[in-house]
Amino acid sequence: MNLVARSIDAPRFASLADFGGNNWNLDAVQAPDVWARGFTGQGVTVAVIDSGVDITHPDLRDNIWINLDEIAGDGVDNDVNGYIDDINGWNFGIGQNNANVSPGTNNSGQEHGTHVAGTIAARNNGSGNTGVAPDAKIMALRLGDVADGWFVNGGSLPEAIRYAVDNGARVINLSLGSADSPQLQSALAYAASRNVVTVSASGNEGLLSPGAPARYATQYGLSVGAVNRERSVARFSNRAGGSPRLRHVVAPGVQIYSTLPGNSYGFLSGTSMATPHVAGTVALMLSANPTLTHNQVRQILTDTAVG
């Protein structure tokens, strides 16, 4: 992977034989080439702001972020961060506002966050799927409950972004859409100011430019579109638009195999599925060179991206 090599001023990494099959997505982002050099996302926490994560899934449970400054179940805000018993993250859902980060319903849309998390950091254990950064940690931030692809009690995305930054995430995966607001822009600016990289789905409407929050990649983080096995941009994927300032890349997002709640696996498609490939790639870059700034990550990715 040339961009991770560039992160450490090394020659281009050697290309290994493709895995193929359900792992075509890992081949496409050249993740195994980076693992062979010893960079697997170790030491990097990726926040997944989504529908919740099945933190007991066998391919995820060893890679779930743990807040070591909090004591589980004692009803006390031990680390004085404003959230009680936030051991693995927080549920920002309206009317919830609690530490339950697992998918809250059996609606098919609730599986979204678990699938995203697996693409980023499912363990390389010979079963199921393997994430792009299989030794990164996942901070699970749930925005509430989902029905028919929409949050029915969606909590504050800006608050969730700020939580991720303040509690040690280096990368934030935003496989979602949001309304524009000054609060959202402020939160994205805050993340960038702390060298936290936000990675946002461009959207699935087949439009010429991305929706929010990806449209803010003119200044903050990255916008991600989806490609298929043939590396053609998916019909549903929003494009980059006309702004030369937009930091937009593409990644595998069609029929991606990853973790699902209940110790299972399955295929999903969308720019939501492309985004975690880029978040995982950023985790690989930061595990290779933790000193990279927000702007350096954006520059390297968009200068060396293929496809």
Image (cartoon, rainbow, N blue to C red):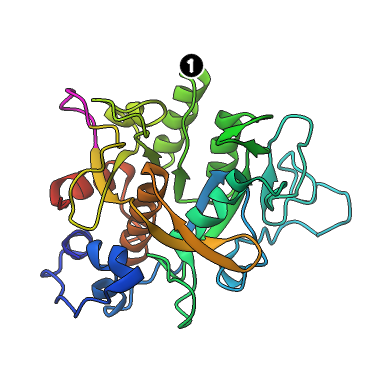
Extent of the magenta region: 240-247
Name the quadrant containing residue 195. Answer: top left
The correct choice, above or below, for 224 with respect to 131 in the image is above
Q: Answer few, some or many: residues within 10 Å of disc 1's Cα (few below 14, many 20 plus, some between 14 and 19).
A: few
The outermost residue toward the left is 11
Residue depicted at x 75% and y 56%: 70
Residue 297 placement (x, y as % from top left): 28, 48
Would you say residue 241 sits in the magenta stretch?
Answer: yes
Residue 17 placement (x, y as % from top left): 19, 80
**Lateral position of residue 5 relative to residue 277, left or right:** left
Name the quadrant containing residue 185. Answer: top left
The correct choice, above or below, for 206 with respect to 113 in the image is above
Pick the residue in front: 161 or 208: 208
Quarter of the image with the N terminus is bottom left
Residue depicted at x 28% and y 80%: 36
Residue depicted at x 67% and y 67%: 56
Residue 198 seen in render: no
Question: The residue under label 1 is which amino acid type?
Answer: Pro
Pick the residue in front: 141 or 237: 237
The residue beneath circle 1 is 182
Residue 147 seen in render: yes
Pick the residue in front: 107 or 144: 107
Asked which secondary structure carries label 1, the reply is helix
Residue 122 placement (x, y as % from top left): 49, 68
**Lateral position of residue 218 relative to residue 59, left or right:** left
